[in-house]
């Protein structure tokens, strides 16, 4: 296809993607699910698992292979902006306030699922249907462990905010534990990606460059970037020029971490963490948040869905493995975090709520899986199995949370008490 034909098709793809995501989102909302869940499902439905199965010729026309490069590139822009916004909302004070309990819950939510994921990977690594031939057993264990350990931190934060739990004991602990959890999982993934390069110098550039970038940005960079906050306060908002500078910095951060072969989202997230809070953060989120979440981010879900082929899980053995992965993920994350919260002195209802929130994988899981597939670490079959696990654990989050904690909160609000 010519560049002109691809551009014409891209506009059709955008309209189709947005329409399907809105429709599925409307249905999901009526079922009490979040927009993130609906877009994950919509992405799978638009891929070969349903659309390509029912109308293969039409699906092939709407999403031809030649258009995947454009779809991938634009989805990465949306993903970087989204992770920048997540970093912008990252509150270090949350961790300081509940450090002991947060460390306990986070450690349980990392170690147990990592161990279970590693055990599974040690068996699956010998089969070329799951991991690529060039992947060592150690790399497979590290990648699977990181994938099982991740938490849907943005979704967790959104549930806490929407339920009016920001600043409460439960909300603070869940956000602090989730942020520590994801930071550790991303560090493990960075090591896997650097190791997979096979070149010690290459690995040193990735790990050393990533650490240097993060440390410099959250120390010296944070103080330098504070000028953006002062300008926003002085001008009473974020001007077009200030927004342009901000976006340029986000893209440079994404470029650098992509260039050292970690991943663009690392650079964007750390850039968000280093940015000033207050008026600046509020205005930037207001200006680019809606466009990012409603227009650009769905492209990433669709790109993931196009790589998800449920038909690959076509034998009782593969469905058994899918079930084992799901159980291991739920036990390793949800149950482990619940027990850790209980041992830290949290009431049982709050501990169950924390375990439920920590068990959701959401968008963060899809990011890791797409990185693994793109870099040739995992095969499409394992990618599909892990996507199914991500969807199910994310689907569970909202209804189970409402079941274990929503009713208690409703009673507290009705009686005029503040939720814990």
Image (cartoon, helix red, strand yellow):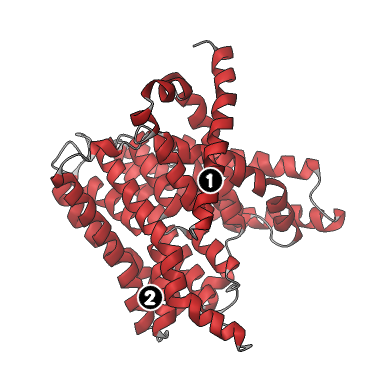
Residue at x-position 41% and y-position 22%: 60
Residue at x-position 26% and y-position 36%: 311
Residue 371 lies, in percent from the top left, at: 39, 40
Q: Residues within 10 Å of mark 1 (few under 14, many from 20)?
A: many
The residue wearing badge 1 is 267
Q: Which element is circle 2 on?
A: helix
Report the disc number at residue 104: 2
Residue 375 lies, in percent from the top left, at: 34, 35
Q: Which element is circle 1 on?
A: helix
Residue at x-position 66% and y-position 39%: 248
Q: In terms of depth relative to the viewer, which is nearer, 241 or 345?
A: 345
Could you tell whether 63 is left or right of 74 in the image? left
Between the C-alphas of marks 2 and 1, the distance is 28 Å
Q: In terms of depth relative to the viewer, which is nearer, 344 or 392?
A: 392
Q: Quadrant of residue 381?
A: top left
Could you tell whether 201 is left or right of 224 in the image? left
Residue at x-position 50% and y-position 41%: 264
Front position among marks 2 and 1? 2
Could you tell whether 335 is left or right of 270 in the image? left
Q: Quadrant of residue 397?
A: bottom left
Question: Does any portion of residue 49 appear in the rendered image?
Answer: yes
- Name above or below for residue 160 compared with residue 84: below
Residue 73 lies, in percent from the top left, at: 52, 30
Comes first in the chain, label 2 or label 1: 2
Q: Residues within 10 Å of mark 2 (few under 14, many from 20)?
A: some
Marks 2/1 in contact by CB < 8 Å: the verdict is no
Question: Does any portion of residue 255 appear in the rendered image?
Answer: no
């Amino acid at each position: 296809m010519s560049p002109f034909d691809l551009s014409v098709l891209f506009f059709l793809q955008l309209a189709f993607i947005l329409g399907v995501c809105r429709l599925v989102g409307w249905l999901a909302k009526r079922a009490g699910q979040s927009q993130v869940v609906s877009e994950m499902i919509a992405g799978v439905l638009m891929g070969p698992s349903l659309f390509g199965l029912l109308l293969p010729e039409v699906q092939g026309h709407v999403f031809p292979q030649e258009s995947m490069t454009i779809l991938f590139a634009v989805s990465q822009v949306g993903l970087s902006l989204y992770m920048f916004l997540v970093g912008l909302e990252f509150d270090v004070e949350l961790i300081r306030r509940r450090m002991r309990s947060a460390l306990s819950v986070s450690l349980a939510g990392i170690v147990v699922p990592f161990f279970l994921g590693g055990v599974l990977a040690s068996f699956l690594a010998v089969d070329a249907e799951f991991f690529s031939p060039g992947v060592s057993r150690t790399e497979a264990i590290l990648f699977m462990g990181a994938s099982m350990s991740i938490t849907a931190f943005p979704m967790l934060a959104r549930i806490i905010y929407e339920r009016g739990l920001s600043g409460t004991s439960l909300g603070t602990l869940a956000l602090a534990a989730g942020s520590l959890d994801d930071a550790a999982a991303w560090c493990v993934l960075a090591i896997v990606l650097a190791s997979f390069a096979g070149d010690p110098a290459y690995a040193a550039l990735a790990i050393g460059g990533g650490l240097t970038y993060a440390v410099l940005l959250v120390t010296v960079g944070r103080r330098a970037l504070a000028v953006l906050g002062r300008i926003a306060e002085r001008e009473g908002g974020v001007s077009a020029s200030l927004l342009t500078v901000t976006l340029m910095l986000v893209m440079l951060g994404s470029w650098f971490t992509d260039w050292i072969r970690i991943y663009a989202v690392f650079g964007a997230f750390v850039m968000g963490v280093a940015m000033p809070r207050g008026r600046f953060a509020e205005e930037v989120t207001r200006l680019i948040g809606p466009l990012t979440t409603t227009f650009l981010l769905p492209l990433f879900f669709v790109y993931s869905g196009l790589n998800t082929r449920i038909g690959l899980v076509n034998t009782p053995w593969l469905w058994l493995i899918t079930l084992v992965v799901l159980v291991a993920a739920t036990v390793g994350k949800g149950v482990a975090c619940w027990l850790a919260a209980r041992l830290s002195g949290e009431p049982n209802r709050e501990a169950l709520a924390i375990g439920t929130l920590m068990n959701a994988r959401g968008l963060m899981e899809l990011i890791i899986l797409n990185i693994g597939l793109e870099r040739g670490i995992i095969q499409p079959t394992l990618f599909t199995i892990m996507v199914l696990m991500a969807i199910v654990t994310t689907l569970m989050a909202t209804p189970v949370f409402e079941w274990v904690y929503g009713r208690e909160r409703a009673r507290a609000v009705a009686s005029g008490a503040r939720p814990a």
